[in-house]
Image (tube, grey):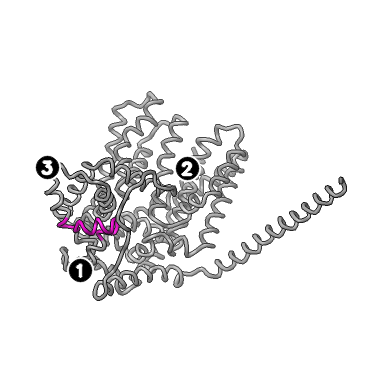
Amino acid sequence: MKKKHVFNKVILIGYALNLILCFICSIFYFHPIYEHVGWENRAYKWLSSGETMEEEILGRLLCMIYSYILAMLLLYLMWYWIVRLFKLWNECKSKRIYVLLFLILSFLGILTIIGLYPTPVSDPPDTAWNYVYAREFLPMYWHGFLTNVVHCACMIIFPHPVAMSIIPFLLGITGLCYILYQSVIKNCKHELLCIFIFFIFLLSMPETVQVFIYAGRNYHYALLSVCTLGIFLVDYMNNVIITKAKILWLSFLICFLACWRGEGIAYLVAFPFMLYGAYYQKNTKISLKKIFKYSFFIVGIFLLLRIPDMYGSEKYQGDDYIIINLPGPLSAVWANNPNTNYKSYEKDMEHINTVININYIIKYADMGSQNYNWDNLRISRQSDAGENGKAFIYAAYDILFHNLNTFLKYQFNVFAKSLGVSSFFKLNTGPVELYVQQGIIKDNYDKVMDYYRFGRNDIGIKHNIELINKTIDINWSVFAKGIIDFLYCNGMQYSAYIKLTKTSHT
Protein backbone atom coordinates (compact mmCIF):
# COMPACT_ATOMS: atom_id res chain seq x y z
CA MET A 1 0.00 0.00 0.00
CA LYS A 2 2.89 2.31 0.91
CA LYS A 3 4.69 1.56 -2.38
CA LYS A 4 1.53 2.36 -4.34
CA HIS A 5 1.25 5.69 -2.51
CA VAL A 6 4.87 6.58 -3.43
CA PHE A 7 4.19 5.45 -7.01
CA ASN A 8 1.19 7.81 -7.31
CA LYS A 9 3.07 10.67 -5.61
CA VAL A 10 5.97 10.46 -8.10
CA ILE A 11 3.54 10.51 -11.02
CA LEU A 12 1.72 13.56 -9.69
CA ILE A 13 4.89 15.55 -8.93
CA GLY A 14 6.47 14.84 -12.32
CA TYR A 15 3.17 15.48 -14.07
CA ALA A 16 2.55 18.82 -12.29
CA LEU A 17 6.06 20.16 -13.03
CA ASN A 18 5.85 19.05 -16.66
CA LEU A 19 2.42 20.64 -17.03
CA ILE A 20 3.60 24.01 -15.66
CA LEU A 21 6.60 23.99 -18.02
CA CYS A 22 4.38 23.15 -21.01
CA PHE A 23 1.95 25.95 -20.15
CA ILE A 24 4.78 28.53 -19.93
CA CYS A 25 6.32 27.41 -23.24
CA SER A 26 2.94 27.43 -25.01
CA ILE A 27 2.39 31.10 -24.11
CA PHE A 28 5.37 32.03 -26.29
CA TYR A 29 4.85 29.38 -28.97
CA PHE A 30 1.20 29.79 -30.01
CA HIS A 31 0.71 32.96 -32.05
CA PRO A 32 -0.20 33.93 -35.65
CA ILE A 33 2.62 33.10 -38.06
CA TYR A 34 1.04 34.30 -41.32
CA GLU A 35 -0.72 37.54 -42.14
CA HIS A 36 -3.45 35.78 -44.13
CA VAL A 37 -4.33 33.10 -41.62
CA GLY A 38 -7.55 31.43 -42.72
CA TRP A 39 -7.53 33.39 -46.01
CA GLU A 40 -10.00 31.10 -47.76
CA ASN A 41 -12.36 31.58 -44.83
CA ARG A 42 -12.68 35.27 -45.69
CA ALA A 43 -15.23 34.02 -48.16
CA TYR A 44 -17.54 33.48 -45.21
CA LYS A 45 -17.74 37.25 -44.88
CA TRP A 46 -19.86 37.44 -48.01
CA LEU A 47 -21.27 33.93 -48.16
CA SER A 48 -23.30 33.68 -44.98
CA SER A 49 -21.73 34.19 -41.57
CA GLY A 50 -20.67 37.83 -41.89
CA GLU A 51 -17.30 37.31 -40.19
CA THR A 52 -14.00 35.61 -40.82
CA MET A 53 -12.74 32.81 -38.63
CA GLU A 54 -10.06 35.13 -37.28
CA GLU A 55 -12.87 37.10 -35.68
CA GLU A 56 -14.41 33.94 -34.22
CA ILE A 57 -13.69 34.20 -30.50
CA LEU A 58 -15.79 31.26 -29.31
CA GLY A 59 -14.34 28.71 -31.75
CA ARG A 60 -10.78 29.71 -30.92
CA LEU A 61 -11.48 29.66 -27.18
CA LEU A 62 -13.02 26.18 -27.38
CA CYS A 63 -10.06 24.95 -29.42
CA MET A 64 -7.69 26.27 -26.74
CA ILE A 65 -9.64 24.74 -23.83
CA TYR A 66 -10.02 21.33 -25.50
CA SER A 67 -6.33 21.32 -26.54
CA TYR A 68 -5.12 21.95 -22.98
CA ILE A 69 -7.47 19.29 -21.59
CA LEU A 70 -6.21 16.73 -24.14
CA ALA A 71 -2.58 17.72 -23.44
CA MET A 72 -3.21 17.20 -19.70
CA LEU A 73 -4.66 13.72 -20.33
CA LEU A 74 -1.79 12.72 -22.64
CA LEU A 75 0.84 14.02 -20.21
CA TYR A 76 -0.72 12.07 -17.35
CA LEU A 77 -0.66 8.87 -19.45
CA MET A 78 2.97 9.52 -20.37
CA TRP A 79 4.05 10.03 -16.74
CA TYR A 80 2.02 7.04 -15.59
CA TRP A 81 3.76 4.87 -18.18
CA ILE A 82 7.28 6.24 -17.41
CA VAL A 83 6.94 5.53 -13.68
CA ARG A 84 5.40 2.12 -14.42
CA LEU A 85 8.40 1.19 -16.57
CA PHE A 86 10.81 2.11 -13.74
CA LYS A 87 8.69 0.08 -11.35
CA LEU A 88 8.73 -2.98 -13.65
CA TRP A 89 12.50 -2.68 -14.11
CA ASN A 90 13.16 -2.57 -10.35
CA GLU A 91 10.61 -5.11 -9.15
CA CYS A 92 10.55 -7.74 -11.87
CA LYS A 93 13.87 -8.84 -13.39
CA SER A 94 12.18 -11.32 -15.74
CA LYS A 95 10.40 -8.44 -17.50
CA ARG A 96 13.46 -6.26 -18.00
CA ILE A 97 14.00 -7.64 -21.49
CA TYR A 98 10.54 -6.36 -22.52
CA VAL A 99 11.13 -2.92 -20.99
CA LEU A 100 14.48 -2.73 -22.79
CA LEU A 101 12.97 -3.74 -26.14
CA PHE A 102 10.21 -1.16 -25.74
CA LEU A 103 12.73 1.59 -24.98
CA ILE A 104 14.89 0.58 -27.97
CA LEU A 105 11.87 0.58 -30.27
CA SER A 106 10.73 3.98 -28.96
CA PHE A 107 14.23 5.43 -29.35
CA LEU A 108 14.57 4.12 -32.92
CA GLY A 109 11.16 5.53 -33.83
CA ILE A 110 11.95 9.00 -32.46
CA LEU A 111 15.35 8.90 -34.18
CA THR A 112 13.66 7.98 -37.47
CA ILE A 113 11.14 10.82 -37.19
CA ILE A 114 13.85 13.37 -36.38
CA GLY A 115 16.14 11.98 -39.07
CA LEU A 116 13.42 12.23 -41.73
CA TYR A 117 12.12 15.61 -40.54
CA PRO A 118 10.39 17.64 -42.00
CA THR A 119 8.98 14.89 -44.25
CA PRO A 120 6.85 13.12 -41.58
CA VAL A 121 5.14 16.42 -40.71
CA SER A 122 5.04 18.33 -44.01
CA ASP A 123 4.24 15.53 -46.47
CA PRO A 124 0.88 14.13 -45.24
CA PRO A 125 -1.97 15.87 -47.13
CA ASP A 126 -3.34 19.00 -45.43
CA THR A 127 -1.08 18.73 -42.35
CA ALA A 128 0.91 21.85 -43.24
CA TRP A 129 -2.39 23.69 -43.72
CA ASN A 130 -3.74 22.53 -40.36
CA TYR A 131 -0.43 23.38 -38.68
CA VAL A 132 -0.76 27.10 -39.51
CA TYR A 133 -4.26 27.09 -38.01
CA ALA A 134 -3.07 25.18 -34.95
CA ARG A 135 -0.33 27.70 -34.19
CA GLU A 136 -3.01 30.14 -33.06
CA PHE A 137 -5.64 27.73 -31.72
CA LEU A 138 -7.81 28.21 -34.80
CA PRO A 139 -9.99 25.14 -35.56
CA MET A 140 -10.11 23.74 -39.09
CA TYR A 141 -13.74 22.62 -39.18
CA TRP A 142 -13.44 21.12 -42.66
CA HIS A 143 -11.03 18.49 -41.34
CA GLY A 144 -12.87 18.15 -38.05
CA PHE A 145 -12.65 20.27 -34.92
CA LEU A 146 -10.68 17.55 -33.12
CA THR A 147 -7.95 17.40 -35.78
CA ASN A 148 -6.44 20.70 -34.75
CA VAL A 149 -7.14 19.97 -31.09
CA VAL A 150 -4.84 16.94 -31.47
CA HIS A 151 -2.17 19.00 -33.25
CA CYS A 152 -2.37 21.78 -30.65
CA ALA A 153 -2.18 19.30 -27.75
CA CYS A 154 0.97 17.71 -29.22
CA MET A 155 2.67 21.12 -29.55
CA ILE A 156 1.61 22.12 -26.03
CA ILE A 157 3.48 19.06 -24.73
CA PHE A 158 6.53 19.89 -26.87
CA PRO A 159 6.60 23.26 -28.69
CA HIS A 160 7.86 22.17 -32.11
CA PRO A 161 6.09 20.84 -35.25
CA VAL A 162 7.90 17.50 -34.90
CA ALA A 163 5.71 16.86 -31.82
CA MET A 164 2.79 16.24 -34.21
CA SER A 165 4.61 13.03 -35.23
CA ILE A 166 6.49 12.06 -32.07
CA ILE A 167 3.62 12.24 -29.53
CA PRO A 168 1.19 10.07 -31.57
CA PHE A 169 4.05 7.66 -32.35
CA LEU A 170 4.82 7.20 -28.64
CA LEU A 171 1.14 6.70 -27.86
CA GLY A 172 0.73 4.22 -30.72
CA ILE A 173 3.87 2.17 -30.01
CA THR A 174 3.05 2.02 -26.30
CA GLY A 175 -0.46 0.80 -27.03
CA LEU A 176 0.70 -1.76 -29.59
CA CYS A 177 3.47 -3.14 -27.37
CA TYR A 178 1.06 -3.39 -24.42
CA ILE A 179 -1.51 -5.22 -26.55
CA LEU A 180 1.14 -7.56 -27.99
CA TYR A 181 2.51 -8.43 -24.56
CA GLN A 182 -0.86 -8.93 -22.86
CA SER A 183 -2.54 -10.86 -25.67
CA VAL A 184 0.32 -12.93 -27.16
CA ILE A 185 3.74 -12.87 -25.44
CA LYS A 186 2.46 -13.41 -21.87
CA ASN A 187 0.55 -16.52 -22.96
CA CYS A 188 3.17 -17.91 -25.35
CA LYS A 189 6.05 -20.33 -24.77
CA HIS A 190 8.17 -18.82 -27.55
CA GLU A 191 8.17 -15.16 -26.51
CA LEU A 192 11.34 -14.19 -28.37
CA LEU A 193 10.00 -15.68 -31.59
CA CYS A 194 6.82 -13.59 -31.22
CA ILE A 195 8.88 -10.46 -30.60
CA PHE A 196 11.05 -11.21 -33.65
CA ILE A 197 7.98 -11.68 -35.85
CA PHE A 198 6.51 -8.43 -34.49
CA PHE A 199 9.70 -6.51 -35.34
CA ILE A 200 9.81 -7.99 -38.85
CA PHE A 201 6.14 -7.11 -39.39
CA LEU A 202 6.62 -3.58 -38.07
CA LEU A 203 9.78 -2.75 -39.99
CA SER A 204 9.22 -4.62 -43.26
CA MET A 205 5.98 -2.93 -44.31
CA PRO A 206 6.35 0.67 -45.53
CA GLU A 207 2.66 1.38 -44.84
CA THR A 208 3.04 0.32 -41.19
CA VAL A 209 6.08 2.55 -40.67
CA GLN A 210 4.24 5.42 -42.37
CA VAL A 211 1.23 5.08 -40.06
CA PHE A 212 3.51 5.26 -37.02
CA ILE A 213 5.75 8.17 -37.97
CA TYR A 214 3.62 10.46 -40.19
CA ALA A 215 1.55 13.32 -38.78
CA GLY A 216 -1.50 12.90 -41.03
CA ARG A 217 -4.85 12.86 -39.28
CA ASN A 218 -5.81 9.54 -40.92
CA TYR A 219 -2.63 7.92 -39.53
CA HIS A 220 -3.36 9.24 -36.03
CA TYR A 221 -6.91 7.95 -36.32
CA ALA A 222 -5.70 4.48 -37.32
CA LEU A 223 -3.34 4.31 -34.32
CA LEU A 224 -6.06 5.40 -31.90
CA SER A 225 -8.48 2.86 -33.39
CA VAL A 226 -6.01 -0.02 -32.97
CA CYS A 227 -5.18 0.98 -29.38
CA THR A 228 -8.85 1.32 -28.39
CA LEU A 229 -9.95 -1.99 -29.92
CA GLY A 230 -6.83 -3.61 -28.47
CA ILE A 231 -7.91 -2.72 -24.94
CA PHE A 232 -11.18 -4.61 -25.43
CA LEU A 233 -9.29 -7.60 -26.87
CA VAL A 234 -6.75 -7.73 -24.02
CA ASP A 235 -9.43 -7.39 -21.33
CA TYR A 236 -11.51 -10.11 -22.98
CA MET A 237 -8.54 -12.51 -23.09
CA ASN A 238 -7.53 -11.78 -19.48
CA ASN A 239 -11.08 -11.78 -18.09
CA VAL A 240 -10.65 -8.30 -16.60
CA ILE A 241 -13.33 -6.89 -14.29
CA ILE A 242 -14.23 -3.41 -15.46
CA THR A 243 -14.13 -0.41 -13.13
CA LYS A 244 -15.88 2.95 -13.29
CA ALA A 245 -12.56 4.70 -14.08
CA LYS A 246 -11.93 2.34 -16.98
CA ILE A 247 -15.43 2.68 -18.39
CA LEU A 248 -14.92 6.45 -18.33
CA TRP A 249 -11.65 6.14 -20.28
CA LEU A 250 -13.20 3.74 -22.79
CA SER A 251 -16.20 6.03 -23.23
CA PHE A 252 -13.87 8.95 -23.91
CA LEU A 253 -11.84 6.98 -26.48
CA ILE A 254 -14.96 5.71 -28.29
CA CYS A 255 -16.56 9.17 -28.37
CA PHE A 256 -13.29 10.70 -29.59
CA LEU A 257 -13.23 8.24 -32.49
CA ALA A 258 -16.92 8.83 -33.20
CA CYS A 259 -16.57 12.63 -33.29
CA TRP A 260 -13.22 12.91 -35.05
CA ARG A 261 -14.24 11.31 -38.35
CA GLY A 262 -17.66 10.53 -39.81
CA GLU A 263 -17.09 6.76 -40.14
CA GLY A 264 -16.32 6.68 -36.40
CA ILE A 265 -20.06 6.64 -35.67
CA ALA A 266 -19.77 2.85 -36.11
CA TYR A 267 -17.75 2.73 -32.85
CA LEU A 268 -20.53 4.52 -31.01
CA VAL A 269 -23.14 2.03 -32.24
CA ALA A 270 -20.91 -0.95 -31.44
CA PHE A 271 -19.85 0.28 -27.97
CA PRO A 272 -22.56 -1.49 -25.88
CA PHE A 273 -21.95 -4.74 -27.80
CA MET A 274 -18.16 -4.48 -27.24
CA LEU A 275 -18.80 -3.91 -23.53
CA TYR A 276 -21.04 -6.98 -23.46
CA GLY A 277 -18.55 -9.17 -25.34
CA ALA A 278 -15.45 -8.09 -23.42
CA TYR A 279 -16.77 -7.72 -19.86
CA TYR A 280 -20.16 -9.40 -19.40
CA GLN A 281 -20.00 -12.58 -21.42
CA LYS A 282 -17.08 -14.07 -19.45
CA ASN A 283 -17.66 -12.25 -16.16
CA THR A 284 -20.98 -12.99 -14.50
CA LYS A 285 -20.22 -10.61 -11.61
CA ILE A 286 -21.24 -7.70 -13.83
CA SER A 287 -24.92 -7.53 -14.62
CA LEU A 288 -26.30 -6.67 -18.03
CA LYS A 289 -28.08 -3.74 -16.38
CA LYS A 290 -24.72 -2.31 -15.33
CA ILE A 291 -23.36 -2.63 -18.85
CA PHE A 292 -26.19 -0.50 -20.21
CA LYS A 293 -25.81 1.91 -17.31
CA TYR A 294 -22.10 2.30 -18.06
CA SER A 295 -22.77 2.82 -21.76
CA PHE A 296 -24.72 6.00 -20.89
CA PHE A 297 -21.41 7.65 -20.02
CA ILE A 298 -20.97 8.10 -23.74
CA VAL A 299 -23.99 10.40 -24.08
CA GLY A 300 -22.47 13.26 -22.05
CA ILE A 301 -18.95 12.77 -23.42
CA PHE A 302 -20.19 12.56 -27.00
CA LEU A 303 -22.10 15.84 -26.66
CA LEU A 304 -19.10 17.59 -25.08
CA LEU A 305 -16.89 16.51 -27.97
CA ARG A 306 -19.45 16.92 -30.75
CA ILE A 307 -21.08 20.30 -29.97
CA PRO A 308 -18.07 22.50 -30.97
CA ASP A 309 -17.79 20.67 -34.28
CA MET A 310 -21.54 20.96 -34.92
CA TYR A 311 -21.43 24.67 -34.12
CA GLY A 312 -18.45 25.36 -36.40
CA SER A 313 -19.65 23.15 -39.23
CA GLU A 314 -23.09 24.74 -39.27
CA LYS A 315 -21.70 28.26 -39.17
CA TYR A 316 -18.67 27.93 -41.45
CA GLN A 317 -18.61 24.54 -43.11
CA GLY A 318 -22.03 23.34 -44.15
CA ASP A 319 -22.24 19.85 -45.65
CA ASP A 320 -19.42 20.39 -48.10
CA TYR A 321 -17.22 17.56 -46.82
CA ILE A 322 -19.98 15.08 -47.69
CA ILE A 323 -20.92 16.86 -50.91
CA ILE A 324 -17.44 16.76 -52.48
CA ASN A 325 -17.34 12.97 -52.10
CA LEU A 326 -20.62 12.34 -53.94
CA PRO A 327 -19.79 13.40 -57.56
CA GLY A 328 -17.45 10.37 -57.90
CA PRO A 329 -20.08 7.64 -57.42
CA LEU A 330 -22.70 9.77 -59.22
CA SER A 331 -20.46 10.03 -62.30
CA ALA A 332 -20.11 6.23 -62.26
CA VAL A 333 -23.91 5.92 -62.26
CA TRP A 334 -24.30 8.16 -65.32
CA ALA A 335 -21.47 6.43 -67.16
CA ASN A 336 -22.95 2.94 -66.64
CA ASN A 337 -26.59 2.84 -67.86
CA PRO A 338 -28.35 4.70 -65.02
CA ASN A 339 -31.79 3.74 -63.75
CA THR A 340 -33.98 6.86 -64.05
CA ASN A 341 -37.37 5.13 -63.91
CA TYR A 342 -38.55 6.02 -60.43
CA LYS A 343 -40.97 8.68 -59.15
CA SER A 344 -38.64 11.15 -57.45
CA TYR A 345 -35.96 11.20 -60.21
CA GLU A 346 -36.93 14.62 -61.64
CA LYS A 347 -37.00 16.17 -58.18
CA ASP A 348 -33.63 14.59 -57.33
CA MET A 349 -32.10 16.06 -60.48
CA GLU A 350 -33.45 19.50 -59.58
CA HIS A 351 -31.74 19.34 -56.16
CA ILE A 352 -28.48 18.08 -57.74
CA ASN A 353 -28.36 20.91 -60.28
CA THR A 354 -29.02 23.53 -57.59
CA VAL A 355 -25.66 22.75 -55.97
CA ILE A 356 -23.54 21.21 -58.79
CA ASN A 357 -24.48 21.17 -62.46
CA ILE A 358 -24.82 17.55 -63.53
CA ASN A 359 -22.58 18.13 -66.58
CA TYR A 360 -19.65 18.87 -64.25
CA ILE A 361 -20.27 15.63 -62.36
CA ILE A 362 -20.41 13.61 -65.59
CA LYS A 363 -17.31 15.28 -67.03
CA TYR A 364 -15.01 15.63 -63.99
CA ALA A 365 -16.16 12.90 -61.56
CA ASP A 366 -14.48 13.39 -58.14
CA MET A 367 -13.45 16.95 -58.99
CA GLY A 368 -16.91 17.99 -60.23
CA SER A 369 -17.74 20.03 -57.12
CA GLN A 370 -14.43 21.93 -57.05
CA ASN A 371 -14.47 22.72 -60.77
CA TYR A 372 -18.08 23.94 -60.64
CA ASN A 373 -17.36 26.17 -57.66
CA TRP A 374 -14.28 27.72 -59.29
CA ASP A 375 -16.26 28.43 -62.46
CA ASN A 376 -19.02 30.15 -60.50
CA LEU A 377 -16.86 32.34 -58.25
CA ARG A 378 -17.63 30.21 -55.21
CA ILE A 379 -15.40 28.94 -52.44
CA SER A 380 -16.10 25.25 -51.93
CA ARG A 381 -16.31 25.23 -48.15
CA GLN A 382 -19.39 27.25 -47.25
CA SER A 383 -21.18 27.57 -50.57
CA ASP A 384 -23.07 24.30 -50.13
CA ALA A 385 -24.36 24.99 -46.63
CA GLY A 386 -27.99 25.18 -45.65
CA GLU A 387 -31.11 23.53 -47.04
CA ASN A 388 -29.77 23.25 -50.61
CA GLY A 389 -26.76 21.27 -49.41
CA LYS A 390 -28.90 18.88 -47.36
CA ALA A 391 -31.36 18.43 -50.24
CA PHE A 392 -28.42 17.62 -52.56
CA ILE A 393 -27.21 14.88 -50.19
CA TYR A 394 -30.65 13.27 -49.93
CA ALA A 395 -31.12 13.43 -53.70
CA ALA A 396 -27.65 12.00 -54.39
CA TYR A 397 -28.20 9.01 -52.11
CA ASP A 398 -31.67 8.47 -53.57
CA ILE A 399 -30.11 8.21 -57.04
CA LEU A 400 -27.31 5.95 -55.76
CA PHE A 401 -29.67 3.56 -53.99
CA HIS A 402 -31.80 3.31 -57.13
CA ASN A 403 -28.55 2.31 -58.89
CA LEU A 404 -27.28 0.14 -56.07
CA ASN A 405 -25.33 -2.30 -58.24
CA THR A 406 -23.15 0.47 -59.73
CA PHE A 407 -22.81 2.23 -56.36
CA LEU A 408 -21.57 -0.94 -54.62
CA LYS A 409 -19.10 -1.68 -57.41
CA TYR A 410 -17.75 1.86 -57.15
CA GLN A 411 -17.37 1.56 -53.35
CA PHE A 412 -15.59 -1.78 -53.66
CA ASN A 413 -13.20 -0.22 -56.18
CA VAL A 414 -12.49 2.63 -53.73
CA PHE A 415 -11.83 0.01 -51.05
CA ALA A 416 -9.45 -1.84 -53.39
CA LYS A 417 -7.60 1.41 -54.12
CA SER A 418 -7.19 2.08 -50.38
CA LEU A 419 -5.53 -1.35 -50.07
CA GLY A 420 -3.20 -0.56 -52.95
CA VAL A 421 -4.62 -3.23 -55.28
CA SER A 422 -6.29 -2.98 -58.67
CA SER A 423 -10.02 -2.40 -59.06
CA PHE A 424 -12.41 -5.30 -58.47
CA PHE A 425 -14.87 -4.19 -61.14
CA LYS A 426 -14.70 -2.43 -64.49
CA LEU A 427 -16.58 0.86 -64.26
CA ASN A 428 -16.61 3.96 -66.43
CA THR A 429 -16.22 7.34 -64.69
CA GLY A 430 -15.37 10.87 -65.75
CA PRO A 431 -11.75 12.06 -65.64
CA VAL A 432 -10.48 13.19 -62.24
CA GLU A 433 -9.23 16.59 -63.37
CA LEU A 434 -8.92 19.90 -61.53
CA TYR A 435 -8.59 22.99 -63.66
CA VAL A 436 -8.44 26.58 -62.48
CA GLN A 437 -9.61 29.51 -64.59
CA GLN A 438 -7.39 32.48 -65.28
CA GLY A 439 -8.11 35.84 -63.65
CA ILE A 440 -9.57 36.32 -60.19
CA ILE A 441 -10.17 32.62 -59.53
CA LYS A 442 -6.62 31.75 -60.56
CA ASP A 443 -5.28 34.49 -58.25
CA ASN A 444 -7.40 33.31 -55.34
CA TYR A 445 -6.37 29.69 -55.90
CA ASP A 446 -2.70 30.73 -55.91
CA LYS A 447 -3.20 32.58 -52.60
CA VAL A 448 -4.71 29.48 -51.03
CA MET A 449 -1.80 27.36 -52.27
CA ASP A 450 0.66 30.03 -51.12
CA TYR A 451 -0.90 29.73 -47.67
CA TYR A 452 -0.33 25.96 -47.79
CA ARG A 453 3.28 26.38 -48.99
CA PHE A 454 3.95 28.83 -46.17
CA GLY A 455 3.02 26.17 -43.62
CA ARG A 456 5.43 23.67 -45.19
CA ASN A 457 8.22 26.25 -45.26
CA ASP A 458 7.66 27.19 -41.61
CA ILE A 459 7.79 23.52 -40.62
CA GLY A 460 10.87 22.71 -42.69
CA ILE A 461 12.94 25.92 -42.66
CA LYS A 462 12.08 28.05 -39.63
CA HIS A 463 11.80 25.01 -37.35
CA ASN A 464 14.53 22.98 -39.00
CA ILE A 465 16.67 20.51 -37.11
CA GLU A 466 19.15 20.33 -39.95
CA LEU A 467 22.20 19.59 -37.79
CA ILE A 468 20.56 16.46 -36.39
CA ASN A 469 19.14 15.52 -39.80
CA LYS A 470 22.55 15.75 -41.46
CA THR A 471 24.31 13.90 -38.64
CA ILE A 472 21.82 11.03 -38.78
CA ASP A 473 21.85 11.02 -42.58
CA ILE A 474 25.67 10.91 -42.79
CA ASN A 475 26.05 8.27 -40.06
CA TRP A 476 23.29 6.14 -41.50
CA SER A 477 24.83 6.40 -44.98
CA VAL A 478 28.23 5.32 -43.60
CA PHE A 479 26.61 2.47 -41.66
CA ALA A 480 24.55 1.29 -44.66
CA LYS A 481 27.60 1.53 -46.97
CA GLY A 482 29.64 -0.50 -44.47
CA ILE A 483 27.02 -3.26 -44.45
CA ILE A 484 26.80 -3.30 -48.26
CA ASP A 485 30.61 -3.37 -48.61
CA PHE A 486 30.85 -6.14 -46.03
CA LEU A 487 28.22 -8.26 -47.77
CA TYR A 488 29.70 -7.55 -51.19
CA CYS A 489 33.29 -8.39 -50.15
CA ASN A 490 32.23 -11.54 -48.33
CA GLY A 491 30.00 -12.49 -51.23
CA MET A 492 32.90 -12.10 -53.65
CA GLN A 493 35.17 -14.16 -51.39
CA TYR A 494 32.50 -16.85 -51.05
CA SER A 495 31.98 -16.90 -54.82
CA ALA A 496 35.74 -17.23 -55.39
CA TYR A 497 35.87 -20.05 -52.83
CA ILE A 498 33.06 -21.93 -54.61
CA LYS A 499 34.78 -21.56 -57.96
CA LEU A 500 38.11 -22.71 -56.51
CA THR A 501 36.41 -25.75 -54.88
CA LYS A 502 34.72 -26.71 -58.15
CA THR A 503 38.00 -26.36 -60.05
CA SER A 504 39.87 -28.55 -57.57
CA HIS A 505 37.17 -31.25 -57.79
CA THR A 506 37.26 -31.30 -61.55
Image point 12% across, 48% down: which residue? 346
Quadrant in which residue 425 is drawn: top left
Image point 83% across, 47% down: which residue? 502
Magenta region? 353-369
Q: SS for tag 1?
A: loop
Q: SS for tag 2?
A: helix
Q: Residue furthest top?
A: 284
Sequence-wise, which precedes: disc 1 or disc 2? Answer: 2
* Left or right position of 241 against 328: right
Q: Does the image show residue 20?
A: no
* Magenta span includes 360: yes
Q: Please, what is the three-letter code of the amino acid marked with disc 1?
A: Leu
* Magenta span includes 175: no
Image point 77% across, 52% down: which residue? 495
- In this view, the residue in front, 86 or 138, is 138
Q: Label 1, label 3: how many angstroms apart (C-alpha)?
A: 34 Å
- Residue labelled with disc 3: 343
**Compared with residue 137, is residue 415 higher up or lower down, i.e. above or below?**
above
- Residue labelled with disc 2: 5
Q: Please, what is the three-letter code of the amino acid marked with disc 2?
A: His
Q: Please, what is the three-letter code of the amino acid marked with disc 3?
A: Lys
Q: Label 3, label 2: how many angstroms apart (C-alpha)?
A: 71 Å
**Compared with residue 451, is residue 243 higher up or lower down, i.e. above or below?**
above
Residue 218, percent from left and from top = 38, 52
Q: Does the image show residue 164?
A: yes
- Residue labelled with disc 1: 377
- In this view, the residue in front, 295 or 362, is 362
- In this view, the residue in front, 381 or 395, is 395
* Left or right position of 64 against 194: left
